[in-house]
Amino acid sequence: MKKYLAEMIGTMVLVLMGCGAAVSLGCDPVNNQAAVVGTAMAFGLSVVAMAYAIGGISGCHINPAITLGVFLSGRMSAKDCAMYMLFQFIGGLIGAALLFLLVTNAGSGFAAAGAGLGANGLQDGISVASGLLAEIIFTCVFVLVVLGATSKTNGVTGKFGGLAIGLSLILVHLVCIRYTGTSVNPARSFGPAIFAQLAGGPTTALSNLWIFIVGPFAGGALASVIWRVIEPAEK
């Protein structure tokens, strides 16, 4: 149970800090690129912080797409896979709920500006097909980094796995925010989409949620296939 609770706490922190930065900085990939950089760093640094806080307890997946990739790579049981995902989604809901409380109890101007709660959505000029493809591609890249950085065959560089994973998430956000706001994590998208509706945010947050669940899961599964092909034999 401790590792499941650790996943819940880690996912809560990721959503609170990452989406919180998007709200506080006013992340807008067209009109405020500086905020995009800040938001990307917030998500990446949250992963680094949690990797060193709970990595020794649960491995710090804090992302159902990573958990799926790890499971399909043969590194965890089906029971742990299901329980990790359950507690990750719960953590995402808690993180979004805390952000909802912060935003809605702030001044009316801030509450209106932050009503989206960092929920994912297709950006201007991005089609459903393009958004879905972006989520699949960038999740695949991200999960592949996770599988490689945490591999037992990775030698001494494995000690820096948390840093490599966090930096890769920053990189993914810098590219993908312009397409979908960057999910690559179903639990990160689920909570904000739910509470954005309560906060008066965009009505598309829930209707487009499927993109940010299907896309990351497909990308995580694809990464596991690629990893099984290139994975070196254990020494």
Image (spheres, rainbow, N blue to C red):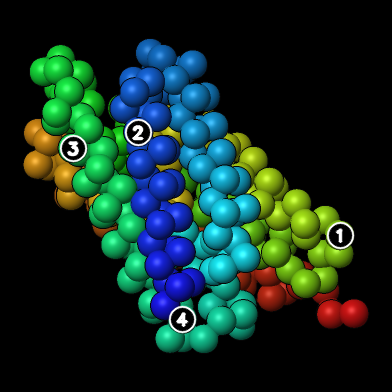
Q: Tell me the amino acid under the disc marked 2.
A: Gly
Q: Residues within 10 Å of mark 1 (few under 14, many from 20)?
A: few
Instruction: Say which residue appears at 29% left-offset and 62% top-offset.
Output: 90
Q: Tell me the amino acid under the disc marked 1.
A: Val
**Callout 3 secondary element:** helix
If you read the primary sequence from the N terminus, does the residue marked by circle 1 or circle 2 appear first? 2
* Image height of 113 relative to 174, above or below: above
Q: Tell me the amino acid under the disc marked 3.
A: Leu
* Image height of 52 relative to 76, above or below: above
If you read the primary sequence from the N terminus, does the residue marked by circle 4 or circle 2 appear first? 2
- Residue 20's disc is 2
Instruction: Say which residue appears at 82% left-offset and 64% top-offset.
Output: 154
In terms of image quadrants, where is residue 9?
Answer: bottom left
What is the distance, in whole Å, between disc 1 and disc 4 at their CAs? Answer: 27 Å
Contact between labelled residues 1 and 3, with CB atoms less than 8 Å apart: no
What is the distance, in whole Å, between disc 4 and disc 3 at their CAs? Answer: 31 Å
In this figure, which residue is indicated by the disc labeled 4? 80
In this figure, which residue is indicated by the disc labeled 1? 156
